[in-house]
Image (cartoon, rainbow, N blue to C red):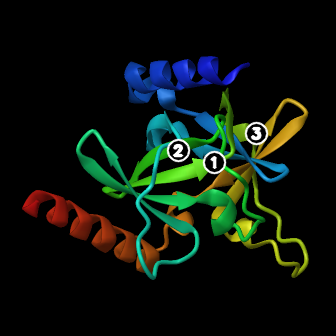
Amino acid sequence: MDEANVLAEVTDVLQEGRDTQKDKYVTFKSGSEHFALKIEYVSEIIVYQDITPIPESEDFIKGLINLRGKIIPVIDVRLRFNQEPFEYNDRTCIIVINYKSTVVGLIVEKIAEVVEIQESNILASPSLGKGDKTQNKYVYAIGKVGDAVKLLLDPDKLLNDEETLAIEKASDGAGEAEEEE
């Protein structure tokens, strides 16, 4: 499925309402792995746009964007997972999520598809060895989709309290600065 069709499908599911969103996930690629995020957290998916950097922030916090007058902090998922950075291109997207009243953009390499994962196909995330698999701490389960598996992301862990507070403070400060201009 090409990216335009995936974006259209996400938009359709978001407009249909909560009942049709049950068991639906947006999947995306980061490095060699495929991740999934419950569609109920997704506000929209936008094409990559210019980002205003935030001085002295974590490397994975890329900065702020202005989305129709709302200032939104943006993080790079690959950097958050301690993966090698990638060069942004025309397939790079920003998944705008709303979790616990915090709106954040997640920069991802490529949106893959919208999938339905029934609860019976969700398995607990295995704990394998002590290798440096930083992204595993952000994964709450594994979803089986046909012959493939998707790592299901926990937005609570992806945006832990300390970092969420810093992100909110940065975006609030930027919003106030814009209002003063």
Tell me which amino acid carries mark 3: Asn
For disc 3, the marked residue is 121
Between 68 and 166, the one lying in front of the other is 68
Q: Residue furthest left?
A: 180
Q: Residue 45: x and y, percent?
A: 49, 35
For disc 1, the marked residue is 108
| Residue mark closest to the camera, 1 vs 3 | 1
Tell me which amino acid carries mark 1: Val
Residue shown at 47%/78% (left/top)? 57
Contact? badges 2 and 1 (CB < 8 Å): yes
Q: Residue 130: x and y, percent?
A: 87, 82
Tell me which amino acid carries mark 2: Ile
| Mark closest to the chain's N terminus, 3 or 2 | 2
Secondary structure state at the residue bearing disc 3: helix
| Mark closest to the chain's N terminus, 2 or 1 | 2
| Mark closest to the chain's N terminus, 1 or 3 | 1
- Report whether 105 appears left or right of 85: left
Residue 67, by quadrant, is: top left
User: Residue 94's mark?
Assistant: 2
Secondary structure state at the residue bearing disc 2: strand
Q: Residue 61: x and y, percent?
A: 51, 68
| Residue mark closest to the camera, 3 vs 2 | 2
